[in-house]
Amino acid sequence: RNVTERVNDRPNEQTNERTSGRTSRRADEMVSWMVALFLSVSMSQALLLRQPTTFTPTGHAYNLSPRPTMAAALPTARRGALGRAVASGSAPFGGRAGGRGCRLAAAAAAEPGTGASADADATNAVSSILTNSKLTYFGLPGRGEAIRLALAIGGVEFEDERVPFPRWGQVKPTTPWGTVPVLELADGSRLSQARSVLRFVGQYTGLYPSSDYLLAQRVDELMDALEDLGSTITSIGQGLPKNEQEAARLAAVSEGGAVYDQLAKIDAFIEAYGSGGHAVGDAMNIASILTFTTIGRVVGGVFYGVPPTVCDPFPNIQAVRRAVGGHPAVVSWYSGRVESGAKLSPAEEVLAGCRGM
């Protein structure tokens, strides 16, 4: 009987063991999940407590902490092939692990200091990341001129490399995107895409709003509108014989034409959001600089059929051209170009002529 009872009880014991095992595993999984959730919440709270905020007059809160870079946020083992390529210097975008750009990012991600020493550190960091950089573009204003002037106004020493058109076929494959301008920092990091580079330079030279996010949006908005202006002029009369193209563009820049309407909107935008000859806000920034260089191309003979008087009906645009053209750093820049004996393109001659506008 005892043997029979033990045999009969064995299935129940096995069932109980399986049930107990499943229960134990579920308990372990639950504990692991709760620990992970606790750690996640704790880390989030710690980050929130470290991020200072400010409140605008409208009651909106903005986080003013420097944003950590992707490289700083990810463990080294998880940065992937691109991260390893950039760190090794083999990627077309350049850069080296531990370079000045990396040190600046690490400094920005660290807890901010206080007092005059923090301001001095910030100034030194800005100087170190842009000083002795090299800007590569063609020997004409184009998309690179606004960056040149932003660096000049920011007091940055840089190499102005101008690529002759016959050499472009050799240079193009060496650029990150097959385009110029390209800004190479002293640590080897290579930055490309015109407006992106312009914004980067503006951020580190005080020519881009750092804490007023609405003002920064207005700067970006105007820069996008200026990009649209150039695209519109380029598209008008495209594919037509030269005389027909010039006639089409002349009609477009005359009152009632598509380009005239865009210029009128830009002029109204400057009147609404700028002051004192500044395109956005009440101080010099990259919106004014890009307005200056873009309009210089429009009136400087880059686009066939567009007369040099096209902006005369727009007083706010003209005020920006006078303000930027008369800036001491801009006057010095173009005076240096003229005195060096460099051959200026028609568009650059127009920009240089704004010194006495």
Image: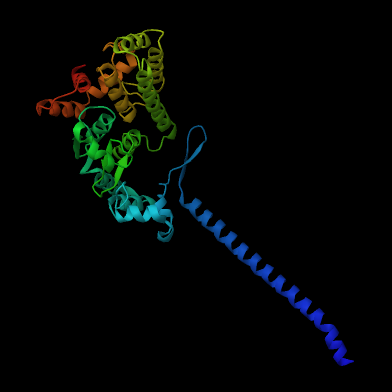
Residue 234 in percent (x, y) is at: 35, 20
Specify how the rendered protein is coloured.
rainbow
Q: Is residue 60 left or right of residue 95?
A: right
Residue nearest the viewer, comparing 165 with 311: 165
Residue nearest the viewer, comparing 117 with 84: 84
Q: Is residue 265 left or right of residue 162?
A: right
The residue drawn where x is 83% and y is 88% is 6
Up/down of 219 relative to 74, above or below: above
The N terminus: image quadrant: bottom right
Asked whether residue 111 appears in the rendered view, the answer is no
Up/down of 353 relative to 141, above or below: above
Res 15 quadrant in image: bottom right
Res 341 quadrant in image: top left
Up/down of 95 relative to 267, above or below: below
Asked whether residue 336 appears in the rendered view, the answer is yes
Q: Is residue 343 left or right of residue 261?
A: left
Residue nearest the viewer, comparing 178 with 151: 178
Residue 218 in percent (x, y) is at: 41, 28
Up/down of 108 relative to 225, above or below: below
Res 232 quadrant in image: top left
The C terminus: image quadrant: top left
Residue 299 in percent (x, y) is at: 27, 16
Q: How many marks?
A: 0
Residue 60 in percent (x, y) is at: 51, 36
The residue drawn where x is 30% and y is 36% is 179
